[in-house]
Amino acid sequence: MIKGLYEAHLPISDLAVSIDFYSRLGLEVAHHGDAVTFFWIEKGKSWLGLWVTDKVDTPYHPSLRHIAFHVELDDLLEARAWLFERNIDVRTAFNFKPEQQPIVLPNHPQSHAAIYFNDPDGNSLELITPMQVEEDINFKMMELKDWKM
């Protein structure tokens, strides 16, 4: 099921300092914002999200540790049952209940479909697959079953 790391997120205190640091490690900026910047770990495949901890309008709570694992779309369609077989509960995410997942998220620079759960310590985990969408398409978050594949 799991093919590799898709994304990891870290809280940071100073965006400029962190951008300089991760750039010196050779990572390329994928998206730069006021409260969050994404760096490619492996371009087009995985990234690191850096979230400024003191930004009130940050949509992602920086104290939450989060890792997403890359899966193929066919596997994501079976992910809820796969997790259930392993006694792992899907959790509500973005107001979508477990039975409504996987969901499609209109993120940039790439949209994706995902399902969410926690590890035994409450860390946020995600199974995720990239979705092919046209750059100028605008849509709201929805259940994957409602997405026209």
Image: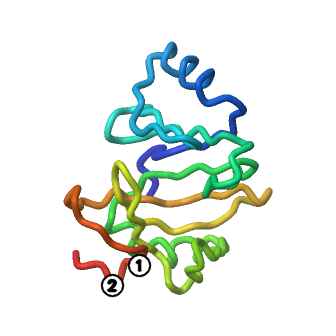
Could you tell me the amino acid type at mark 1?
A: Met
Instruction: Name the residue nearer the viewer: 14 or 116.
Output: 14
* Element marked by disc 2: helix
Q: Residue at x 35, y 48 (%)?
A: 109
Residue 57, placed above or below residue 95: above
> Dividing the picture into quarters, in which one does residue 90 lie?
bottom right
Residue located beneath label 1 in the image: 142
Q: Position of residue 78 (x, y in %)?
A: 42, 75
Q: Residue at x 30, y 61 (%)?
A: 131
> Dividing the picture into quarters, in which one does residue 29 lie?
top left
**Image-based side of 146 in relation to 149, left or right:** right
> Dividing the picture into quarters, in which one does residue 96 lie?
bottom right
| C-beta proximity under 8 Å, tags 2 and 1 | yes
Q: Residue at x 62, y 42 (%)?
A: 51
Instruction: Name the residue nearer the viewer: 101 or 95.
Output: 95
Could you tell me the amino acid type at mark 2?
A: Asp
Image quarter where the C terminus lies is: bottom left
**Image-based side of 71 in relation to 116, left or right:** left
Colouring convention used in this rendered image of the protein:
rainbow
Q: Position of residue 107 (x, y in %)?
A: 41, 58
Circle 1 residues within 10 Å: few <14, some 14–19, many ≥20: some
Q: Position of residue 57 (x, y in %)?
A: 64, 55
Residue placed furthest toward the top: 24
Circle 2 residues within 10 Å: few <14, some 14–19, many ≥20: few
Q: Residue at x 72, y 32 (%)?
A: 13
Whole-number angstrom distance, CA of label 2 to CA of label 1 = 7 Å
Q: Position of residue 134 (x, y in %)?
A: 19, 60
Residue 148, placed above or below residue 72: below
Residue located beneath label 2 in the image: 146
